[in-house]
Amino acid sequence: TYVVDAVCRGVQLQAGANYLVDICAAESALKAALARYDRRNLDDLAEFAGDNTTCERVARAVWERVAAALPRPPALASLQIVVRESDVARVEYERSLGASDGGLYSVCVRARFMAARTLAGGVEGSTFVVDALFSGRELDPRATFLFDICLAEELLQRAVAHLHQTHLDEQLPHLFGAGKPPPTAGAIARVIWEAVAEGLPPEHRLAGLKVLVREHDEAAAEYSRPLAPADGDSCGGDNCGGGTGAVPARGEGTVVRRGRCMIAHSFRGEAFGPAQALHGCTYVVDAVCRGVQLQAGANYLVDICAAESALKAALARYDRRNLDDLAEFAGDNTTCERVARAVWERVAAALPRPPALASLQIVVRESDVARVEYERSLGASDGGLYSVCVRARFMAARTLAGGVEGSTFVVDALFSGRELDPRATFLFDICLAEELLQRAVAHLHQTHLDEQLPHLFGAGKPPPTAGAIARVIWEAVAEGLPPEHRLAGLKVLVREHDEAAAEYSRPLAPADGDSCGGDNCGGGTGAVPARGEGTVVRRGRCMIAHSFRGEAFGPAQALHGCTYVVDAV
């Protein structure tokens, strides 16, 4: 599944219109270009004869179609096409409008690591999300790509591996020792840049490399340096290599700000491996309020400003702290599960309690592929439901009613239960959860599902829909669960793209402890209702304007607007 952006650039707005380009015309041009390839087998298209249909090749093809259809006001200078094949890999192609060639290709891959560090306020931790952007102007004529995206991922993973679950002050003394700059995101980006550049093969065709390090979703820094200048002379760096054009270095000063909770901690117990050492993490935390009806006269469930204040106050207790030092966690490992419950208790205590407000859920994300949820009825002294969610992805072709088509499938596995392991203070080992899910999807990656899974998708069997795929993955994950698990339920959600998904859910043990009748039933402490395999999600969006009546709404009593993203489940 390709998610494609068209980015138009120019130096001034059109006189009298106050826009660079008519956005409706740009949308139409992009939609028409993508319609040429949507649900098609690209191997059958004459325009790609002799070429591998890599993301780079597809990006250039879309560029040519959009550029041909786009209105050309004088101020419109260039067009960039961004093709995302997954949430961790993308390709960009940018060219001046009117130029016959000379476009700049970029291949971007993503990795992450968790670490602690000492800054001005003391020891703190983060989940660092790292993007590496490889740029150049010529494709390899044999492979039709700029740079092997698998090698790009390998180089980046190798560069961040020795930083994961460490204390950066100790791990990188040559950079962060006495008298050296502190381990800021910009300094970390430079270390990773050098490690990636050092691993580049001598025959690469790249012009530049940029590394972007996000401390959290509101703070980031980048380090960029050309791999070869435009004139071909030495660039003066240790890692300069061949290339076909210059990419200007943008330094390490690009910074973005948003809200978060950054913590440091360590775990006790052999099950945690390297995480027994002091390390860090950035938690992105959601508070989800649920109820059965709206407040009379206000048309809301709970005052959203009060809910935001309650969450901010709860997170302020832990932000930039070493959780090992806090008395409330004495004797406990500060796992995501334990932190989620602590935040729940603080938010619940501060939250207004209208009669219709029934439950509160806290979602703690430690990275973009792993999260924990804790939900409990408001007023209940205990009995909350914990859930551990991990993510994987695979790319595959399949035959549906319209013929052969392909997708990047994003798969979430949600493990649920009501009791934590008293020794480890977790519901289920999140590393084992990731391993089980990765193993379940590995044999589906880069295959034709009709051939890969004949026992499910063969003649006379249902087609390989997202729901059917979810069931296959559910069975593979459940089969790998250790017999002593404390889980009550397992749910697998398969997204075909950002507007279509299906899930398969089944309890691992019923409430009364009797056999649940399935091959993969195991121990558990509470029931999670089976939802079958019929849950289907569809997404749409609409842009609206409105105003509210009532003093409780403050400035929102004036006419304002919103984009609603709406799911039907």
Image (spheres, rainbow, N blue to C red):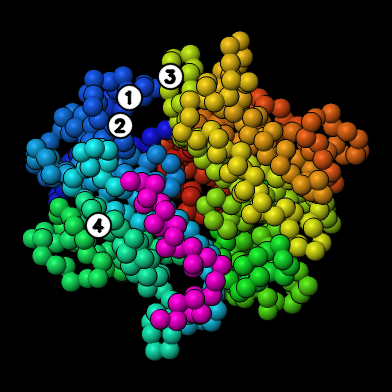
Q: Residue at x 57, y 37 (%)?
A: 441
Q: Which residue range is magenta in the image?
A: 148-174
Assess whether mark 1 and mark 4 are in contact (beta carbons under 8 angstroms): no
Q: Residue at x 58, y 55 (%)?
A: 365
Residue on which disc 1 sits: 42
Whole-number angstrom distance, CA of label 3 to CA of label 2: 16 Å
Residue on which disc 4 sits: 202
Residue on which disc 3 sits: 404
In the picture, the disc for residue 53 is 2
Whole-number angstrom distance, CA of label 3 to CA of label 4: 39 Å
Q: Secondary structure at mark 2?
A: loop
Whole-number angstrom distance, CA of label 2 to CA of label 1: 7 Å
Comes first in the chain, label 3 or label 2? 2
Comes first in the chain, label 3 or label 4? 4
At label 3, counting other C-alpha atoms closer than 10 Å, the crowd grade (few under 14, some 14-19, many 20 or more) is some
Whole-number angstrom distance, CA of label 4 to CA of label 2: 25 Å
Residue 42 versus residue 129 in the image, above or below: above
Q: Does the magenta stretch mainly form a helix, a strand or a loop?
A: helix
> Three-letter amino acid code at disc 4?
Pro
Comes first in the chain, label 4 or label 1? 1
> Three-letter amino acid code at disc 2?
Thr
Comes first in the chain, label 2 or label 1? 1
Assess whether mark 1 and mark 2 are in contact (beta carbons under 8 angstroms): yes
